Image (spheres, rainbow, N blue to C red):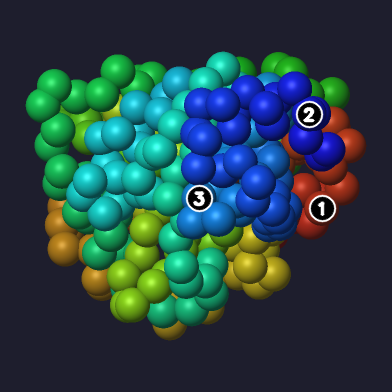
Amino acid sequence: MKLSPTLRRTIETALPGLTGLDWVPLTGGRTNHLWRVGDQVVKVFDGSQASPLFPNDDAAEVEALRCFGPLGLAPRLTGSGPGWIAYGFLSGSTWRSDPRPVAQMLFRLHSSRPSPLPSFRDLPSGSAALTRQARAILTECRGNLPGTEVASGEVGPCPEVVPVHSDIVPGNLIVGSGSVTAIDWQCPAIGDPTEDLATFLSPAMQWLYRGHVLTSDERIAFLAAYPDRQVVGRLQMLLPAYRLRMAAHCLWRAERGVPDYETALKLELSA
């Protein structure tokens, strides 16, 4: 994306410290457009990239960074305006290996208990609600999946909802000094903590953002590093419903001209 001179002037007026600095495009994202400008990142949102599973809400990201930036779970917000935000650049690299710090960061997020809870969207919770959401996504697709029934028993709604990132993929995790910080908070929510665990474990998301799925050892290490065993047990029962929903998302994306989601769909269905 080429940044319009008008929008650049608007952002530099709001953040005078950026004036005269080079705007260096950042790669790796699939949804929005980012530049590094000095010690900050400027993000311009592309509303056309929202999907039924992953919204693209700039106002929600502003609220998330204000809430979780001071806790070290997100970057620190430095400015925002209609359709754009700026935040402090995080030194480090995107996550590639050792899932244990990711599990520990997610537990910190899920245990943060901000009061009042942020005004994020509410997520469907429980196997029946997740299956309904998957079927709703499929109504927007021309094709279908081999089956839309979940083999596991009924799992009820989460007894205690918490803030979740909801888009925990390798490209949204920055590793630095042994810790992990999440970026791209454009679709945060209030919901079941298993939501973030399931997204990280998704074969489709791992392949799309890392080039290969988690190994068996990585999956075991990730789940072992998440301290709440009740949440892990609940996740195991809900995984068939989460995988059905992710497969529906991949089909939705593939039908809208993103061909690598065809491979992602096959990986999700074969898990």
Q: Position of residue 245 (x, y in %)?
A: 56, 36
Q: Residues within 10 Å of mark 1 (few under 14, many from 20)?
A: some
Find disc 1 in the rendering and name its residue. Answer: 260
- Tell me, for residue 40, which label it has, or none: 3
* Circle nearer the viewer, 1 or 2: 2
Q: Is residue 185 visible?
A: yes
Q: Residues within 10 Å of mark 3 (few under 14, many from 20)?
A: many
Give the farthest residue toward the bottom. Answer: 217
Identify which amino acid the numbered label 3 is placed on. Answer: Gln
- In the figure, 51 relative to 196: above or below? above
Find disc 2 in the rendering and name its residue. Answer: 5
Q: Are marks 3 and 1 in contact (CB under 8 Å)?
A: no
* Circle nearer the viewer, 3 or 1: 3
Identify which amino acid the numbered label 2 is placed on. Answer: Pro
Mark 2 and mark 3 lie on one chain; the one further toward the N terminus is 2
Question: In this image, 89 relative to 1: left or right?
Answer: left
Q: Position of residue 187 (x, y in %)?
A: 48, 32
Q: Are marks 2 and 3 in contact (CB under 8 Å)?
A: no
Q: Nearer the viewer, residue 236 or 118?
A: 118
Instruction: Kindly identify the residue that appears in the image at 11 percent across and 26 percent down.
Output: 115
Q: Position of residue 171 (x, y in %)?
A: 57, 58
The answer for how far apart the CA atoms under marks 3 and 1 are is 31 Å
Q: Are marks 1 and 2 in contact (CB under 8 Å)?
A: no
* Circle nearer the viewer, 2 or 3: 2
Identify which amino acid the numbered label 1 is placed on. Answer: Asp
Question: In this image, 237 relative to 151: left or right?
Answer: left
Where disc 1 sits, the SS reads helix
Identify the image quadrant of residue 98: bottom left
The answer for how far apart the CA atoms under marks 2 and 3 are is 19 Å
Mark 3 and mark 1 lie on one chain; the one further toward the N terminus is 3
